[in-house]
């Protein structure tokens, strides 16, 4: 997992897990040929680089992590805390495992406080994760409404185009309704139909909708 391309895949897996409320476990790399173990701080750094590229608000300094080191040995240790706190730690000799928890049951947080060194209060990383569909809808609904307002001004009282304009408006309304009902696929389809109608109206006026 030393290549940043690989970390992008890891980042997306963590994102998908957190969106579902589940935990992610990163068993850090070992190479017997090179006698190489990946340090937790290097893993954290790579995740931050992936965040700067992907920008899905998955990893930042407030993300709660667990680092388990040398589990099963006499010197095993488990340290938990925010990324900002852990990035300053020396975790000692390998091997290490990094856990990015999603939603934690109170029994999990109680166990963590009892058996690990907690530098910060356990935090629900999933609470701030927004699904890709929600990100898209949050971005495109306001954009579609602004575009529709512009189209309405273009056509004024043209009765022939009013049904098309009204359908576009209804599709936008449906998108928000489906999103609130948790029907993500229908919400995305609805905003897509709305944008298609709006683009068609623009094209009918000789306006390139993609400029």
Image: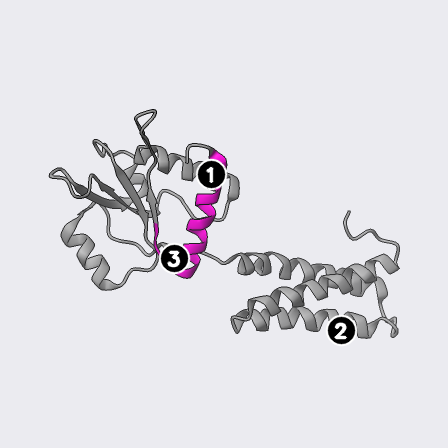
Q: CA distance from mark 2 to mark 3?
A: 38 Å
Are the residues tagged 2 and 1 within 8 Å (C-beta)? Answer: no
Say what secondary structure mark 3 lies in: helix
Q: CA distance from mark 2 to mark 1?
A: 46 Å
Is residue 53 a member of the stretch shown in magenta? Answer: no
Q: Which mark is residue 126?
A: 3
The nearer-to-camera label among 2 and 3 is: 3
Q: Which residue is mark 2?
A: 166
Name which residue lies at 36% across and 38% down: 44
Is residue 141 depicted above or below 88 in this figure? below
The nearer-to-camera label among 2 and 1 is: 1
Name which residue lies at 69% across and 62% down: 192
Relative placement, left or right, of 201 versus 74 is right
Q: Quadrant of residue 39?
A: top left
Q: Which residue is mark 1?
A: 6
The magenta segment is 4-24
Q: Quadrant of the N terminus?
A: top left
Q: CA distance from mark 3 to mark 1?
A: 23 Å
Q: Position of residue 61 (x, y in %)?
A: 36, 42
Task: Judge the density around disc 1: few (<14), some (14-19), many (≥20) Cα neighbours within 10 Å.
Answer: few
């Amino acid at each position: 997992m030393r290549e940043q391309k690989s970390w992008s895949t890891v980042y997306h897996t963590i994102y998908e897990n957190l969106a579902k409320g589940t935990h992610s476990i990163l068993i850090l790399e070992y190479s017997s040929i090179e006698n190489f173990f990946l340090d937790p701080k290097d893993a954290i750094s790579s995740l931050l680089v992936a965040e700067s590229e992907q920008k899905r608000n998955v990893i930042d300094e407030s993300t709660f992590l667990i680092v388990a080191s040398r589990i099963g040995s006499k010197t095993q240790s488990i340290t938990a805390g925010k990324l900002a706190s852990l990035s300053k730690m020396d975790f000692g000799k390998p091997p290490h495992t990094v856990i990015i928890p999603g939603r934690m049951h109170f029994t999990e947080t109680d166990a963590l406080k009892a058996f690990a060194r907690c530098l910060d209060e356990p935090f629900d990383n999933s609470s701030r994760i927004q699904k890709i569909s929600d990100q898209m809808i949050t971005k495109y609904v306001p954009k579609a409404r602004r575009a529709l307002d512009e189209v309405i001004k273009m056509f004024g009282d043209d009765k022939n185009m009013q049904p098309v304009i009204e359908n576009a408006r209804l599709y936008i309304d449906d998108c928000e309704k489906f999103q609130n009902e948790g029907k993500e696929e229908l919400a995305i389809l609805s905003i897509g139909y709305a944008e298609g109608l709006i683009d068609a109206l623009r094209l009918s006026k000789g306006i390139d909708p993609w400029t």
